[in-house]
Image (cartoon, rainbow, N blue to C red):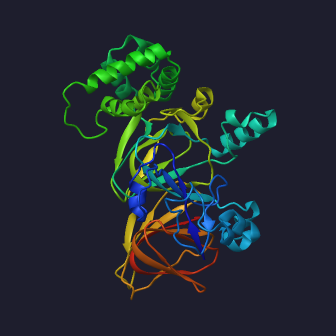
Amino acid sequence: MFRLQGRIQHYAWGSHHALPDFVGLPADGLPWAEIWYGSHPSAPAVVTSTTPWFPVPSQAQNEVADPAASHTLNEIIAADPTAVLGPDAAPTSVLPYLVKLLAAGRPLSLQAHPDADQAAAGYAHERQVGTSPTECNYADGRHKPETLFALLPTRALAGFRTPAAILADLRRLDVVGLGKAIEAMAQSDNDEEALRSGFDTVLRLEQSAVDEALAAIAARMVQPAEEHLWGSDSLAVAAELLVHYPGDVGVLAAIFLNALELEPGEALSVGAGVVHCYVSGLGLEVMANSDNVLRAGLTKKRVDFDELVRILDFKPGGALVSGPERQRIPGTPSTVRNYKTPAAEYAVKIYEINGGTYPVEVTDTAGPRIVVGLDGATVVSSQQSRMALTAGDAVLGIDGEALRLTGQGSVAIVRVP
């Protein structure tokens, strides 16, 4: 069992307080967007015996407290992939999943991820033709299904609404510049074709038409506010996005998407080709170990609308919001929440441990498991070691290693199904 030091990502959309408060560290004036626990080469976790488990605010971004005494998780896996990952994952020497804590202080980009075949083909093609790294759409050859487990109330946009609902909102704006998109959608009786035509047309509008439509959305912001549940009025959601992304076509694209509000304990699973955006909140995010992202707006980063539209799933809906199956653990006052996800790379359980005199034996021992503390103080024990986890602390249990939980707190355990 290895103690993991998470790698903090200071992206501009992050919250200045949510993650520092969660892990019990002082705010440092920087936006804390994510903390990564995994072996992705962009920011591999560090295996260390030093404390604190995160770089303290006085240190440089992502600097490890004691590099000489530490190894990245990649190095640990490479040294003995079979022992760490087990025989199924060892041939690739890659941890199949990536675990993050995510805090959105403002909306992330509208984005989607390719399926496995699209990722493999796209990655191979770009390398074959020598595409410049700054122009690449594919960072690797893997797909990226993902699930966000809400730790605080969390808002998101995910999956397409029905064409009829979208058309009603576009017409409410009463903007000449949206005429092409409205006409493109109205001409088709097939929902997927209508969504494809309308979404593609909006993304490619002249900036003058975008500005005209955004001005109509802005005008609605100065009108007397109406009481409504968040997400019940897609134009109100667009107005909220406009505050953060003036002039961005992604504000219009967001009108096409379902607005969702997750309560703590609920999970949002996003599959290949589903456009989505986390708007605000705090959660534990688990995904396949990939960094393939194609963006539709709400960003200053590169966009490729041709490739994005090619890989999108235009069926209405598309995102799965679910609650867990909650069970009492026999012989203990503790409970476990078992989440069903559509991904083959990961499965997630959240254990709520309620008393040190009633140890909980973790029955899932195959493959690598990352354990992340969510609240309280939970002690994770194996035959060789014993570590206490508070919120944000993490350990990796290697293949076949039996784990026991005691104490008073909650932990998430991520494993390969």
- Seen in the image, is 325 located left or right of residue 361? left
Picture layout, residue 234 above or below residue 230:
above
- Image coordinates for residue 53, horizontal then vertical, percent: 53, 68
The furthest residue to the front: 58
Q: Which residue lies furthest to the bottom in this view?
A: 357
**Could you say which quadrant of the image residue 317 lies in?**
top left
Name the residue nearer the viewer: 127 or 215: 215
Above or below — where is 46 with respect to 309?
below
The residue sitting at 50% across, 53% down in the picture is: 34
Note whether residue 43 is visible: yes
Q: Where is residue 236 in the image (x, y as percent from the top left)?
A: 30, 31
Would you say 172 lies left or right of 383 here?
Answer: left
* Residue 274 position in % (x across, y down): 51, 40
* Residue in view at x 51 percent, y 23 percent: 203
In this view, the residue in front, 105 or 383, is 105
Dividing the picture into quadrants, the one containing residue 346 is: bottom right
Image quarter of the C terminus: bottom right
Q: Residue furthest top?
A: 176
